[in-house]
Amino acid sequence: MPYLGSEDVVKELKKALCNPHIQADRLRYRNVIQRVIRMSKLDQWGQAEVLNFLLRYQPRSEEELFDILNLLDSFLKSSSPGVVMGATKLFLILAKQFPHVQTDVLVRVKGPLLAACSSESRELCFAALCHVRQILRSLPGHFSSHYKKFFCSYSEPHYIKLQKVEVLCELVNDENVQQVLEELRGYCTDVSADLAQAAIFAIGGIARTYTDQCVQILTELLGLRQEHITTVVVQTFRDLVWLCPQCTEAVCQALPGCEEIIQDGEGKQALIWLLGVHGERIPNAPYVFEDFVDNVKSETFPAVKMELLTALLRLFLSRPAECQDMLGRLLHYSIEEEKDMAVRDRGLFYYRLLLAGVEEVKRILCSPKSDPSLRLLEDQAEKPVNSWASDFNTLVPVYGKARWATICACQGTERRGPDLSNTASFATSGPLIPEENKERAQELPDSGALTLVPNHQLTAEYFEKTWLSLKVAHQQVVPWQGAVHPDTLQMALQVVNIQTIAVSKAGAQPWKAYLSAQEDTGCLFLTELLLEPESLEMQISVKQSEARPETLSSFISVLETVIGTIGDIKS
Amino acid sequence: MISQFFILSSKGDPLIYKDFRGDSGGRDVAELFYRKLTGLPGDESPVVMHHEDRHFIHIRHSGLYLVATTSENISPFSLLELLSRLATLLGDYCGSLGEGTISRNVALVYELLDEVLDYGYVQTTSTEMLRNFIQTEAVVSKPFSLFDLSSVGLFGAETQQSKVAPSSAASRPVLSSRSDQSQKNEVFLDVVERLSVLIASNGSLLKVDVQGEIRLKSFLPSGSEMRIGLTEEFCVGKSELRGYGPGIRVDEVSFHSSVHLDEFESHRILHLQPPQGELTVMRYQLSDDLPSPLPFRLFPSVQWDRGSGRLQVYLKLRCDLPPKSQALNVRMHLPLPRGVLSLSQELSSPEQKAELGDGALRWDLPRVQGGSQLSGLFQMDVPGLPGPPSQGHSTSAPPLGLGPASLSFELPRHTCSGLQVRFLRLAFRPCSNANPHKWVRHLSHSDAYVIRI
């Protein structure tokens, strides 16, 4: 039990949280919680712990809820950032039903968060910036008037600058867009290429709402004729014309000249795509393609070659006379000389498509040139506060959602490892586990007395009849995450001679499968696999036609191994 | 709660290692951390890292890495606060925090860790409570002496002993043994401000931000009352008005939890009973509205001949402090375009120094008097330089890569916000050995003073 300041404090908390009698009696439980909240002599660590415990408490009435919030109000003004954030999280979670209370709390925590963002401690600054981004996802205008605090300073480490650029992109509004764009434009010519590229992408993000100003800035950047800048600007343009077709004209005027500067694969792909889709507005598009086609043999990126094929075919549809010759040479090269099979296949496909006639080609290749509705969909993706309130003040915002998901997935597979070998004693000392694994590995060959008949077929009716007549011999669960891929499962089971009688489609809820296997003595094993929706475990039920415990356990271990392997492959 | 705690030197050598819960790995985790840290890709943040089932969270303090590992998803703010508090505590007990002091005081550090954390949970970090449990003495590198004036540092040329304490005076261990009464009772109060400024290329002020702290380091026995009086006309927030005249204003203030604010409203007096050791009494910040003019203005003029590749940069630095004040250790860092071949310089006064290093120009001015103007003319050869499309031969638009100039400096006895400590009174104690010495200093230094060219 953490030391929280004095003996009676500890006693109260223990009473509230450990004594089942008190927990069973709601009134006494509530009284103890109220006493805990009113304790004033806790130091900052005690306060943080109390706030953490209170997350589990459910107030019974609205009156009690506001009572608690009033008592804990002073914690929001504490000088310790841990306590302030803990109190904020508690308020956000307790006031789930009251969005205006949540907004109010977020307004009050603005001050401490901004102070943390300018703190001397870089690490604190970084954690605060991640939380600011979290808040901006729900309340985009929240920090707009304080945009100056997020200007990057020269001596900051790279990871802080990147976060600040992202924040600037997200807090733009009508009043500050001018200054923010000026500032970002300054970063685009920064010595560090990474920061410059991040700033350009940020301008691209702002361009979805303030298209004209941003396109102008990006066009000016093209004038500098710097390689790392031009490639990112062209990529940004490619993304932009898809969402905001009104800027296509301006983009097309800016493009000529870029092909001489761009060297990397991503930039070339973006340029080629733009020339292909909007080629009829760009006068020298065929000449640029001429250059690419002439040098296709020395092109190192297969993705560029694929894009080239598609784009040239598109341009051919609108400017046939200029592109015919080039297209022919390109197709000849891809089909006859190209070593990358993906490129060759695409070339072959386009050739055959052309043989089928121009109308066919137009039908397939003329896709829409832009999708403005996508932008509106993205803009409306403001998340409600409740979706991230439980992640506030934890490590999740600091890692970012994507990285946190991979971390959870890794942790899932690791926990499955010890389960499969059925070790009861977990991890206190390293050396124990490898030995147990060795024992386990030795056991399996010894119990290899089980041989399953290959190519054994059982009809569905027979299976059903036998299934209903037998009792369950063994049931267990294995940990499982996510959906099942039936084909993979089927193939893996086939390898060990277990036949799949019936299986639900991937993603069905609940998901079930029925398996059967026959031993060479004639004993049948019938198995049901069940995965409930939103469950982290798969249930296995096995029925045996003859009662033979030792063969049963061998069958179970084989089945477990297969299921475990599939789980590992999938994640 | 944390699983392990360790301290690494700046090169990755483990100095301290403590395992609290015994549930993850062994000593090799320190090496693992350092390898991961140095091998991290550029855009990932090193503050929180993940490996297997452990999260590593660390801070850098005085060149050391203080690292904690945990397997639970806990609050990053609490963890970072704990690490900072540990750093302060170790500094209090050992005198200062550094590789040398830690290696000399290993036993003391382990004892402290034992008392502060139990099974990974924080028990207490209050110096008061810990004092009763810590038995080990701190080992200092040399005995402290007030006569050691060789490191006068910030206090300028006055060397009268009664008026000046060397800057290392506050760095002896605070919490030495109780029997040592011959030590002087002293209190050090610092008002430290960090100034962040951003000036655009046309001279307009884009951003100005002052973050201030009042820090107290007390060698007095705990529980001694003290009163700190601040400027009476000091207002908090934009709408408050006190006294006559513009007054001194800050935007926001926050206090340490042990400060009593009963007299703050009326007379701007802070009343507290500090424990021994270091404490941040008050934090404040001010943006956008400084009462005094900015300390430095830079007037650059750039001439660039594209044909011959000659770049001439004339920098005029004007100090707008009042004539009696001065700025110390002024250094300007100006990144230069790539491929600079040679540099010739003319500086306006002999004690300045300018040199080329790391793709940038460093101009050192040890002392700048208020109201003075200093200039430097730098000529360099930069063949083949890209830049904005030229509208003629030698343009005044700066070439690419001539980066923003950043200044770093210290302003002793000056606060940018104007806040001053009027008095520091200790409660009357008739039985005390000697009058406790009180040292108050005000200091501003630059955090990020950037002027765009």
Image (tube, coloured by chain):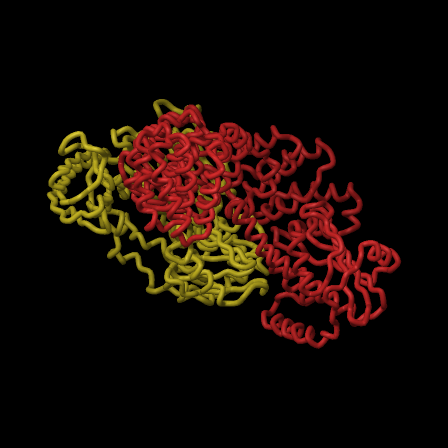
Chain colours: A red, B yellow
Quarter of the image that includes the N terminus of chain A: bottom right
Residue at horizontal 75%, vertical 44%?
Answer: A29
Determine whether, in the image, residue A118 is placed left or right of residue A37: left
Determine whether, in the image, residue A178 is placed left or right of residue B376: right
Image spot of residue B307 (x, y percent): 12, 38
> A288 and A141: which one is in front?
A288
Residue at horizontal 62%, vertical 44%?
Answer: A51
> A174 and A361: which one is in front?
A361
Image spot of residue A368 (x, y percent): 49, 30
Residue at horizontal 77%, vertical 56%?
Answer: A528
> B440 and A200: which one is in front?
A200
Image spot of residue A31 (x, y percent): 74, 41
Residue at horizontal 13%, vertical 42%?
Answer: B379
Quarter of the image that includes the C terminus of chain A: bottom right
Q: Is residue B229 visible?
A: no
Marker count (numbered): 0
Determine whether, in the image, residue A561 is placed left or right of residue B35: right
Q: Is residue A300 visible?
A: yes
Above-or-below relation of A143 to A293: above
